[in-house]
Amino acid sequence: METLKIIRLLSALDLILTTVTVIFVFSLESNLPLLLQDYLVQELKADTTTTEIIAFTVKAITLILYFASLFGLIFVKKWARKLFITTTIIMYQVSFLLGPIVAHAVSFTFDQLSVLVQGMLLAFLVFRNPYPERALNKSLNLTSAENAPSS
């Protein structure tokens, strides 16, 4: 299988896994033990610090850009490579500022699968040339006449 197909497949898989993770995190909160549900309620009632507000804002913006980069990778856009690498690194750095997270085992499993796929994508994007010329030309709808060198 060629690199571009693998990247597109992994991007689609990561898009699905990340979406499922976000949905499960919120929908499975009611299935947590009462002690953990009480902890989540206490966390919601607690005053948020400026650091937490800034970190959450950066994380939310980065998550939107991350989804855009996944769509860009699926549709073979040249800008998506750098955006994916940057947003992935930023998301993990900002996570250190958000504190402890309580999640159901199912949502945590999907999150870990997503992290695994992100690692594979990072490896392909950093260590291989994911965009051969013909794929970029097809994505940009260039014909062979436009690609021909002018004299």
Image: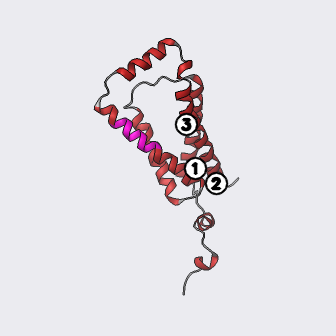
Report the magenta residues as a range: 54-63
Q: Pick whichever of labels 1 and 3 is earlier in the sequence.
A: 3
Which amino acid lies under the numbered mark 1 shown in the image of this protein? Phe
- Per the image, the residue denoted by label 3 is 115
**Taking 139 as reference, is 51 left or right?**
left
Residue occupying image coordinates x 49% and y 46%: 66
Q: Position of residue 132 (x, y in %)?
A: 60, 63
Q: Quadrant of residue 44?
A: top left
Residue 133 visible, this orientation: yes
Q: Earlier in the sequence, mark 2 or mark 1?
A: 2
Quick check: 116 left or right of 95?
right
- Could you tell me if the residues under marks 2 and 1 are in contact, i.e. CB atoms within 8 Å? yes
Mark 1–mark 3 distance (CA, rounded to whole Å): 14 Å
Give the residue pinned by disc 2. 3
In the image, what residue occupies the spot 56% across and 81% down? 149
Q: Nearer the viewer, residue 71 or 82?
A: 71
Q: Assess disc 2: are there few (<14), some (14-19) or many (≥20) residues with their C-alpha within 10 Å of its C-alpha.
A: some
Q: Main secondary structure of the magenta part?
A: helix
Residue at x 55% of width, y 23% of height: 104
Q: Secondary structure at mark 1?
A: helix
**Which label lies toward us, 3 or 2?**
3
User: Residue drawn 58% across and 64% down?
Assistant: 136
Residue kind at label 2, given as amino acid type = Thr
Q: State if disc 3 and disc 1 touch (CB < 8 Å).
A: no
**Can you give x and y, in whole percent of width and height, for residue 63 in the image?**
46, 42
Residue 124's disc is: 1
* Mark 1 crowd level (few <14, some 14–19, many ≥20, 10 Å Cα): some
